[in-house]
Amino acid sequence: MGSSGLLDLEKQFAFYGAYHSNKVNILIHVCFVWPIVFGIVSLLAYTNPLAPQLPVMAALPFHEYMVLNYSFIFTAVYAWFYIILEPKSGSLAAFLMILCWIGANAVAQHIPYASGWRIIAVSQVVCWSAQFIGHGVFEGRAPALLDNLVQAFLMAPYFVLLEVLHTIFHYEPYPGFTKNVQNKVGASIAEYRSKKAKAKRME
């Protein structure tokens, strides 16, 4: 049920969940996290190919958009991480990352870079602003990325996907996962509030 460190699913999900316990904030992230990912992959899709396309790709649908550039490396790292983290839902997350890669390269091939980066920049500003509002107004806590940038960026897309799967389909990676995570999240939030209250008393 998970290994230690970065691949400990409960630990990773509880870390991110402790910063996203408010329902409105979670909804905001569900709406805006994947567009952020797509924007980043799209920007990377404007880079030159690092290797020629593999022959097997030529038989696949939309193969012309399967470019082995930096967008592919970014996608591969995330896809690998999610599958290793949890094979079932992680495979779905990996599939969504692959769709982002293909879609991003389609964008890069059909929209000139001079226009593309401006569109991406505007979308990033909107999406990030919404998330900071979610944290500042509804969550009352700074984003997870301020405490652990790598964990936050890696976990965010998978976190919102797992939230949707659990909410709609009551999916759990394994029995007891949700309860264990909720206990860890509750303990983490209680510790944070205790430290915050102590800091105020010392002011």
Image (spheres, rainbow, N blue to C red):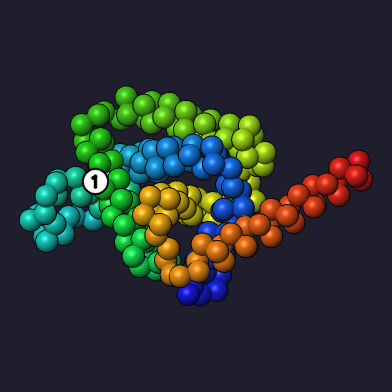
The x and y percentages for residue 44 are 35, 43
Which residue matches tag 1?
102
Judging depth in this view, the residue of 106 and 130 nearest the camera is 130
Residue at the spot 50% in from the left edge and 66% down from the top edge: 177
The x and y percentages for residue 35 are 39, 38
Residue at the spot 17% in from the left edge and 55% down from the top edge: 53
Q: Secondary structure at mark 1?
A: helix
The x and y percentages for residue 135 are 61, 38
Q: Is residue 136 visible?
A: yes
The x and y percentages for residue 54 are 16, 59
For residue 64, above or below residue 109: below
Q: Is residue 190 left or right of residue 123?
A: right
Q: Is residue 120 left or right of residue 20?
A: left
In the rendered image, the residue lying farthest to the right is: 202
In the rendered image, the residue lying farthest to the left is: 59
Residue at the spot 92% in from the left edge and 45% down from the top edge: 202
Task: Please rate how many residues cluster around mark 1, counting C-alpha atoms within 10 Å: few if below 14, some from 14 to 19, many from 20.
Answer: many
Judging depth in this view, the residue of 24 and 144 nearest the camera is 24
Residue at the spot 11% in from the left edge and 49% down from the top edge: 61
For residue 169, above or below residue 100: below
Q: Is residue 119 left or right of residue 5?
A: left
Report the amino acid beneath label 1: Ile
* Quadrant including the C terminus: top right
